[in-house]
Image: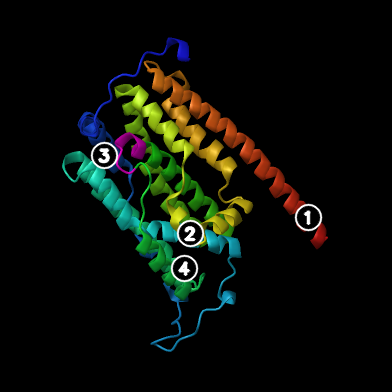
Amino acid sequence: MTASATPRTPQLSQEALLIELEPVVERNLERHLSLAKEWFPHEYVPWSEGRTFDGLLGGEAWSPTDSTIPEVARTALIVNLLTEDNLPSYHRQIATLFGRDRAWGTWVDRWTAEEGRHGIVIRDYLTVTRAVDPVALERARMVHMSTGYSNSHDDEVLHSLAYVSFQELATRISHRNTGKATGDPRCEQLLARVAADENLHMVFYRNLLAAAFELAPSQAMRAVADVVADFQMPGAGIEGFARKSVAIALAGIYDLRQHRDEVLQPVLRQWDVWNVTGLDADGEAAREELAAQLDGLEQSASRFEEKRDARRSRLADRIG
């Protein structure tokens, strides 16, 4: 690939990228609005099951026995909710980067409004059904939101588009699998509804970066390779995230295999990254880095699966 590569081509500025991509934003905003379905968080919450908690109103204290949801599913629900809670930070980031004017601004506000429902409905459900300790949850929310959110590419248009293309799909998968792990059909229905929003958001961002590959192929390839190399979920700043993410991975809710095969690979196929033409030397180098990263993830995923299978086997032997 490098033999036919041209020297590095001039880079489009961040402002130029925003201007050139705005017609694509307009088209995809129209598409999104034609497909997005109106829904209401209150319809997914079994309000009649609610009971007053202890405290000012003198109700019943929360107990782990209040819910039959497995512990690991509770962990995933908390991680998912705290991730959604940081919406003000996400809004600030994309509003600063994309702007509040014209089609970009309309999308920023629409995306924020849709995402806002996710935290509302998950928190209401968990509180009403007593699935988690509300005091611990609120303390965790305060800590997480006080930290805020940022990433190493939050001032770069194409890097940000690459990141959210992967992240929205990863979030969709995490929500769907968390719903299944709860063993609660109502919670699964709720998280499937949230996941449907995340999927539409992913398609919007994925389409924008597809257009960027036509506009500035080398810059887009570099952005994708950089993001894949240091990708972290937006909830990475949650207190105890490393421990929680291991438990979630061991349960098969979201692990390296899913990240590689169900998130990265499908999006990369949509962009047809292995057949992109017109790359300069850095673009070709980025594509080679991307291939190496996927190979590395394959090896890491296989090692994790082997260790997880061995662990499950040991636990089965103990139970047996």
170 within the magenta span: no
The numbered mark, 3 or 4, whose residue comes first in the sequence reads: 3
Considering the numbered disc 3 on the image, is that residue within a helix, a strand or a loop?
helix
| Foreground tag (3 vs 2) | 2
* Pointer 3 with pointer 2, Cβ within 8 A: no
Which residue is the site of mark 2? 79
**Residue 282 or residue 108, whichever sits in front:** 282
From where the camera sits, is residue 46 visible?
Answer: no
Residue at the image position 82 percent from the left and 57 percent from the top: 317
Q: Position of residue 261 (x, y in %)?
A: 56, 36
Q: Is 27 placed above or below 47 here?
A: above
Q: Is residue 307 left or right of residue 236?
A: right
Residue at the image position 50 percent from the left and 61 percent from the top: 77
Q: Position of residue 57 (x, y in %)?
A: 39, 87
Task: Say which amino acid is labelled 4.
Answer: Leu
| Foreground tag (4 vs 1) | 1
Residue at the image position 39 percent from the left and 57 percent from the top: 84
Q: Residue furthest left?
A: 101
Which residue is the site of mark 1? 314
| Label ID, residue 29 | 3
Q: Position of residue 34 (x, y in %)?
A: 29, 41
